[in-house]
Image (tube, rainbow, N blue to C red):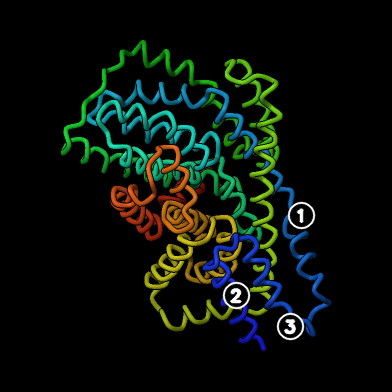
Amino acid sequence: MEVISIIVLFVSFFGLLLLKVPVAYSIGIATTLSLLLNIDKMPGITTIAQRMTTGIDSFALLAIPFFVLAGEIMKRGGIANRLINFAKSLVASLPGGLAYVNILASMLFGAISGSALAAASAIGSIMTDRMEEEGYPRTLSASINITASTTGLLIPPSNILIVYALASGGTASVAALFIAGYIPGILLGFAIMGYVAFIAISKGYAKGKRATLFEVWTFFRKAFFSLLLLVIVVGGIVAGIFTATEASVIAVLYAAVLSLIYGDMKTKDFPDVLLTSAKTTAVVMFLICTSMAMSWLFSFEGIPEMISTFLLDSLNNKFAIFLAINIILLVVGTFMDMTPAVLIFTPIFLPVVTALGMDPVHFGIVIVLNLCIGICTPPVGTLLFVGSGVAKVSVTQVIKPLLPFLAIMVAVLMLISYIPEISMFLPRLFGL
């Protein structure tokens, strides 16, 4: 009966996805169908509702709606322009300077807002037109914006790292994950910059005007309080002054006050911001609900143990196992959103990698970067669609120039997978 139940679970889930049923509904329906085959072993169909409810009964998850709200406020509060101007003062004089500005601004805004989608929409909507005026194709601008925005999911604060901390069952703390994301996120940004430098030199893209030290200082001063949010949020969590949830509330208050001071937002704008944030949060939390129910069913059916045994027995080389897990996650990321993917596959693969000596914090960075690549690819690449939309180009036009950037992301993923110190140096340095 267990084998039939597992087959029904996967066939119905992937079948529903092929029929373009939303991911959360696909997860919920597939889980319910599989559960019905084991109804004699369980209290009843209400088990699904109970697992969905208890799945989000976590204090740590309260951070998500607040970070979503903080990101939405930052997106509308004039912070993006200040970060772009500061980035431009630093790198615009290099060959292909505006492309570097796009990358650096996406990294900064993504890190501050904790959202790749917010970075792609806020920075992309501004930088695409500016880059086109300097002779850059809009498709190239979109490709840069799409891939650079993923760095915000590695550089803290990051909602998806909070979700992973929950899925890991407490074996990886939010503080350790946050601090571990810095070097991989920056490494990814620099790798993208390296390819952009090659393009800029080979295509002969113009250099911008070199900013004077006074101009750099001026733009830094204007962006200082925006950048300070990173220090307050991450520094407070690592120092143990407050939890990630408390930090998210501080981020909302800080961003709101800063946006009002800048004058780019008025008090009358807040109801719309709250409504938009509530809609985003509802989608995320429903995904978490159904994903937690499916994760519980996986445990009930013993799927993590089966997969763990299969991988350890059939691939006795840990490097081959890491490669196999990476390939599976890369494929999964092309059709599944990050949140359910983290919640469903962390309980499956975490026991395998920990048995081979990989730290749960290290694996958290690996799985998130894997899925970052997924949201940049069709058919369900949300970041791909947002980045193409704000650049006003079709997805099909973006695919070709995007491919080299995706190859770079995969190369960075391999480095991070097989060199643990890239992720673990800072957590160990801070004793986390």
Q: Which residue type carries mark 1? A: Asp
Q: Which label number is shown at residue 57?
A: 1
Task: Give the secondary structure at mark 3.
Answer: loop
Determine which quarter of the picture holds residue 92: top left
Residue with the most extreme bottom position: 1
Q: Which residue type carries mark 3? A: Asn
Residue with the most extreme top position: 214
Task: Give the secondary structure at mark 1.
Answer: loop
Q: Which residue is pictured at 31% across the width and 54% down the height?
A: 407
Residue with the most extreme right position: 43
| Closer to viewer: mark 3 or mark 2 | 2
Q: Which label number is shown at residue 12?
A: 2
Mark earlier in primary sequence (3, 2) = 2
> How far apart are the alpha carbons under marks 3 and 2?
16 Å
- Between 344 and 304, which is closer to the camera in this rendering? 344
- Between 431 and 338, which is closer to the camera in this rendering? 338
Residue linked to disc 3: 38
Determine which quarter of the picture holds residue 328: bottom left
Q: Residues within 10 Å of mark 2 (few under 14, many from 20)?
A: some
Determine which quarter of the picture holds residue 220: top left
Q: Position of residue 227 (x, y in %)?
A: 51, 26
Q: Which residue type carries mark 2? A: Ser
Q: Position of residue 417 (x, y in %)?
A: 40, 59
Residue 139 is left or right of residue 237, and the answer is left
- Between 192 and 20, which is closer to the camera in this rendering? 20
| Closer to viewer: mark 1 or mark 3 | 3
Would you say the residues marked 1 and 3 are in contact, meaning their CB atoms lie under 8 Å apart?
A: no
- Between 317 and 110, which is closer to the camera in this rendering? 110
> How far apart are the alpha carbons under marks 1 and 2?
27 Å
Mark earlier in primary sequence (1, 2) = 2
Above or below, comparing residue 376 to residue 204 in the picture? below
Q: Position of residue 70 (x, y in %)?
A: 62, 33
